[in-house]
Amino acid sequence: MAIKTQPVTVNLGPQHPSTHGVFRMRVMFDGEEIVDVEPVFGYLHRGSEKLAEERTYTQVVTLTDRMDYVSSMLNNHAYMLAVEKLAGIEPSPRGVWLRMIASELQRIASHLVATGFLLQDLGALGTPLIYAMRERENILDLFEMLCGARITNSYLRPGGVFMDAPDEFWPALKRSLVDILNTIDELETYLSGNEIVFSRTKGTAVLPPELLINASITGPMLRASGVDWDLRHRNPYDYYDKVQFNRILHTASDNYARYWVRVQEMRESLKIIHQCVEQIEPGPVRPSFDEIPRLIRPPVGDAYVAIEGSKGELGFYLVSDGGISPYRMHVRASSLINLTLLRDMLIGGLFGDLFVTFGSVDLNMGEVDR
Amino acid sequence: MIGLGLPRGFVVTLKNFIRPAVTEQYPDRRIGLFGAAKEAGMNPVRFLFSRPKESFKAFVGLATVPVAVKQSARFRGNEFVFFEDRCTACASCAKYCPLGIIEIVSVPGKIDAQEGESYKLEVFDIDIGRCMFCGLCVEACPYDALHMGTQFERSKYVRDSLVITKEELGAALKRPSSFYRPQFEEKTFDPFLEVIEDFHDAGRHERPSADELKRKWVDER
């Protein structure tokens, strides 16, 4: 005998520990089943794009740190590539290798956070999250050696990075790479074969690849559906054409596939870092101030550069009117665009899968609201 | 292999259970009875009988020693290091700051500035309550007068006391971080132990003396 139920609306957030920031959802339930979802965001809006209009091109780097605060290096990287394209700056080779190493380390850190919090949302309270965070601390220590800060890095400058890596960085990097690989192996040992993880994540929130492409979803979410789209391979920026790595694809397009793609991508990032360390050569890390002054005045025009961020295509669009600061800056925030399919993922699902699905998108409210 | 996933997972957690902890104690570390005796330089048994009150404190975990925090040399702490003797009041730092929180007021020196005397710095305030420690001011300084500091314990009760003045900067302990200062990257220099007293040691360039400036700008013209 079916129990008669009536729909009830529940307000989740904005101050909810499982929403990865200040995000609010109005969810309508019919019993256990989700009938309707309405996302409400904008609680963390700081107007970064507007603030950029009254700062010089170098000063805007500090704003990009605070957009996606678990992958600040990648934000720095995307922004600097846009500035270099706009101003026609030729970067120094050593600076490019260094920022590639920093970006890949940041990608590992971001994926570790995503994996840890996904398991936290599954109900594995503490353990996987702490294991992932412990390894992320190693990476943040490396960033502290490089640039003196752990999260708000501001490491990149037009044409490279501001300072060469210290001597103690390279042995520490070598040690950390081994540690990270061990952690990923460990993570796979206790999670990728775990029956509880299987039963909770396999077959939930399945999205067809056509829908993902139509909604312009990018990143691990798209690759989990079997679409081979990685900007590092499709449209190589910096020296990504000089390194070899596998593209990680999965066909199931469910929550487990998204988790699996992230874990395997960490291994590929490690491979890229190893190749970068082999190919890096001594030299200046940024062009001298005679070539590129501190105050850049790019010619009138616009530039759009997108990189493969940790969450998808991360693009910066800059318009210059010939002045010292951008006339307009727009960020193609991958988290915001990946959020657009939230209704399709959740409706018809169960209440218990709500936060798991939400966690598998890997969004960051700092980037959604900017 | 279905069925083995859970036991394999528990083996991993068991392995992690016996590995040493990575947590760092801050600001103090409990030393216990034996540690307290060692601190006092005594045999534990003698310590127990000669100082029963302290022994009890140590036994219940009240005896602590301060811990030095692991930092890298480039750490951007929130105590700035400023050498007034190196500063020419060019205000590069104020112009480069993304938030505009550095206030500089300078007046020409005794004689006209063009005749070889540098500007005199009257006000140099950093509103550290709004600072985000990006280090761009340090990067901009052409004479290595301003450095990031390695210290970070600077909490205050009142917002107004977060403005660091020139006098406060001058009196503070000068432990510069090696952020954007490659001269401090040498192995012999430890930013957490050594204090730079003399402003000559802090920079890449020697600041010209008043006589040299006068010769350059007045006599040779």
Image: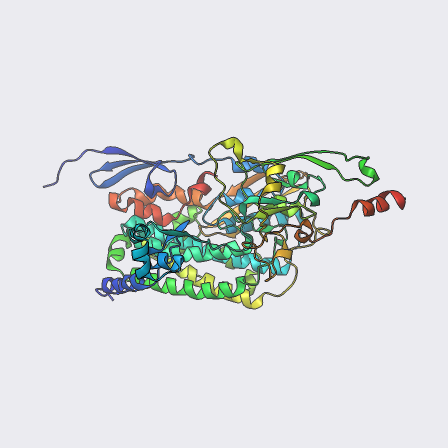
| Relative depth, front residue between B208 and A284 | B208
* Vertical comparison of A88 with A369: above or below: below
- Seen from the viewer's position, the closer of residues A111 and A299 is A111
Residue drawn at x 67%, y 39% as measured from the top left: A324
Viewer-side residue, A195 vs A281: A281
Point out the image quarter for the N terminus of chain B. bottom left
Horizontal and vertical percent for residue B141? 67, 45
Point out the residue furthest to the left here: A1
Left or right: B92 in relation to A14: right
**In which quadrant of the rendered view does residue A260 lie?**
bottom left
Q: Is residue A350 visible?
A: no
Q: Is residue B8 above or below residue B140?
A: below
Quarter of the picture holding the C terminus of chain B: top right
Visible residue check, residue A200 = yes
Q: Is residue B200 above or below residue A265?
A: above
**What is the image's colouring?**
rainbow
Q: Position of residue A342 (x, y in %)?
A: 35, 42
Among the 4 quarters of the image, the one containing residue A348: top left
Q: In the image, residue B38 lies at what x, y percent? A: 38, 60
Furthest residue in direction front, as rendered: B50
Outermost residue, bottom side: A278
Q: Position of residue B143 (x, y in %)?
A: 70, 47
Left or right placement of residue B129 versus residue B199 in this view = left
Q: Could you tell me which residue is drawn at 56 percent across and 64 percent down?
A: A242
Which residue does the image show at 57% across and 67% down from the upper left? Answer: A279
In the image: residue A160, left or right of residue B2: right
